[in-house]
Amino acid sequence: MRHASFGPGSKRPLRRATLWIGIFSLFLSLMTPIIQLNAASAAQGEPPDCDPGYVVDEQLGECVEDPNAQLQPECDEGQVYSEDDGGCIPDPAQQPECDEGQVYDDSYGGCVPDPNAEAEPVGVQVEKYDCSGLDFDPYAASLDDLMSNCDANGTSVQLTVGSDDGEQGSSTTDYTEWTDLPAGSGYVYEDVPEGYGEPVVWCGVYVPNESQPSPSQESIQNGNAVSWQLEPGEYFYCWWFNVQEGGGTSWIDFYKYECAWDTATDEDADYYQQECQAVEGWDFDVQWDGGGSTQTTNDTGLASWSGVPTGSWGGSETLPEGYGEPLVWCRYVEWPDEAGYDDAWEAFDAQGGNFGHEFEYDGTRIECYWFNFATGDTNWIDFYKYSCPIGTTYDGGFEYYE
């Protein structure tokens, strides 16, 4: 019969079992809180996703309004909310389509010129004319008269255009142009040909394929230049007339007026201009040393001569039958500073229709009004008829019967 042994060797399996039981108990004690936390989370579920302006309330487990959030305003039709701007802005999806060279401006609410776009260039075009031997004042003439009486320029003339890009020269005869200039201000000038005076220049602004130039006479700067101011895409078109010098730079203007036979002859020029009538088709002849011509008055009674030199000159008319001696009143209307003239009227003797004067300075202009009166050579008889009542005496005087 075998008895159990209780010696040292018999206790080893029991000790091992006791160790494993202790480890397992420690594991359970550590895992129990985690298991309980997971169970609680599982019971409550995942937190919900909240819309902007809302947050999760942990106690309620649901989304509530965020007390710290700024409420988004309600935008008008055609607008959307911008978080960057913090307000409503035009809906980009509804912005109009802008033309080339324009961009949409949110603040303006429309298309505006693109500040980064390259500005459209401008152009300058010049037609050149030669005015020689004119029998009228080119500086007071219309563009049509100049173009009708002046020839297309046939000799080389140097023209120069200036802008923010600097100057560009061109040797031309009857036409030249520059078509790639920057917008803004600029100028054109020429080297005036020898024997010619200050040019007459008419210009107008237009947009190619959209409008036509409306010309006006330009102010000449420095005796040979005109200036321009152009917006992008605009062109400056000029008709440039070079006026040949005729030995001088003065002018004579004669005006012809006809007065009734009974008009007083002791009045002044202003009176006759009001009481008498301008005569069209009347011939005047003006001569000076080396020049002169006969001119016929227009519908305002005017005949003019330009290029008159300093020195003596004479004017005359052929008096038709039935007219007496003319009354002639003259005054200066232009003169150089050193002349010291004024524009006061002065009466001149023109016996037989002849009148003489002298220019002491270049750049002088005189106007003379010739007033002609019908003579009293024709006799007149006036009859007055009176009827007297029966019984009127026959021996009364003139005053009695009148």
Image (cartoon, helix red, strand yellow):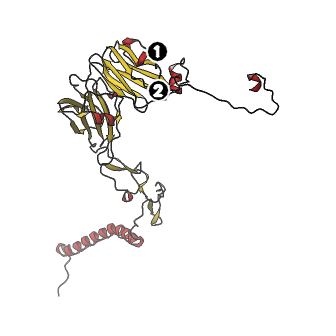
Figure quadrant of residue 125: top left
What's the residue at 35%, 40% (across, down)? 214
Q: Is residue 98 above or below residue 365?
A: below
Tell me if 168 is positioned left or right of 55 in this view: left
Nearest to the observer: residue 284 or residue 147: 284
SS class, disc 2: strand
The residue nearer to you, when weighing 394 against 94, is: 394
Residue under numbered circle 1: 346
Tell me the element at label 1: strand
**Residue 61, picture quadrant:** bottom left
Which kind of residue does numbered mark 1 sit on? Glu
Looking at the image, residue 349 sits to the left or right of residue 392; the answer is left
Name the one closer to the observer, 332 or 315.
315
Position of 339 compared to 396: left or right? left
> Residues under labels 1 and 2: Cα distance?
17 Å
> Which of the marked residues, 1 or 2, is nearer the chain's N terminus?
2
Q: Could you tell me the amino acid type at mark 2?
A: Tyr
Q: Label 2: which residue?
A: 257
Q: Residues within 10 Å of mark 1 (few under 14, many from 20)?
A: few
Q: Please, which residue is most extreme toward the bottom here? A: 1
Please provide percent x and percent y for residue 392: 81, 29
Q: Is residue 277 left or right of residue 141?
A: right
Q: What is the x, y in percent for residue 327?
A: 47, 19
Q: Quadrant of the N terminus?
A: bottom left
